[in-house]
Image (spheres, helix red, strand yellow):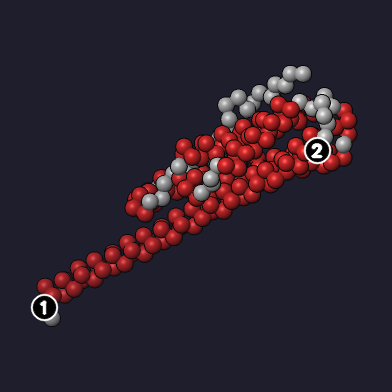
Amino acid sequence: MKKGTIIGLSIAGIIILLLVILISWGISTYNNLVTINEEVNQSWSQVENQYQRRADLIPNLVNTVKGYADFERGVLTDVTEARAKVSQFNITPEVLNDPQAFQKFEQLQGNLSSALSRLLVTVENYPNLKANENFLQLQAQLEGTENRISVERRKFNLTVQNYNTTIKRFPSAFFAGIFGFREKSYFKSIPGSEAPPKVEF
């Protein structure tokens, strides 16, 4: 064999080897991005489950409170309307990729949380209602659900942090851009949520 042919085959072999390495690396990176994207989706579904649990408890809570004729109707109306708005919001997988839709979802959930807080603070003025066994059970379930929501939102934010960090790091950023992996939004506290709800009697 001629020396030029051997050198040509060696160069071709090196190029093929480099292409195989690059393709393998791309496949591995893509699979990793898919895996962490699915972790975000799974974490999001847990958040949704807890929000749904809360939404399912609210009608029972409102009906129990309605039994007290002199209870402030405005507070009950606020809770019912906030729940209806949350229920009307169409949650699709695209919500995670659309910061405005995600913010709207978060705002609606925050409004519902505020309305529920006002309801529970208002109950303090009704000793008979506070002693009602059904109400006490519903209140305990609702408080437990709020805690679960908080835990799942925290887990979701950690998962999103891992995802967002991965798609911004080189070389994953290169493949994330090619395959359409975009940054996802975090849950944030609602402005003013640090202040307790104001209820006037």
Q: Give yes or no for contact between labels 1 and 2 (Cβ–Cβ under 8 Å).
A: no
The quadrant holding residue 74 is top right
Residue ID for mark 1 = 2
**Residue name at image x 52 percent, y 36 percent:** 104
Mark identifier at residue 47? none
Q: Residue at x 51, y 36 (%)?
A: 103
163 lies left or right of 9:
right
Neighbor class of circle 1 (other Cα within 10 Å; few <14, some 14-19, many 20+) is: few
**Mark 1 or mark 2, whichever is nearer to me:** 2
Quadrant of image for the N terminus: bottom left
User: Which of the numbered marks, if any, corresponds to residue 64?
Assistant: 2
Q: Amino acid at mark 1?
A: Lys
**Against 46, is 127 above or below?**
above
x, y percentage for residue 86? 60, 40
Counting from the top left corner in percent of width and height, residue 10 is at 20, 71
Residue 81 versus residue 181: which sits nearer the camera? 81
Amino acid at dot 2: Thr
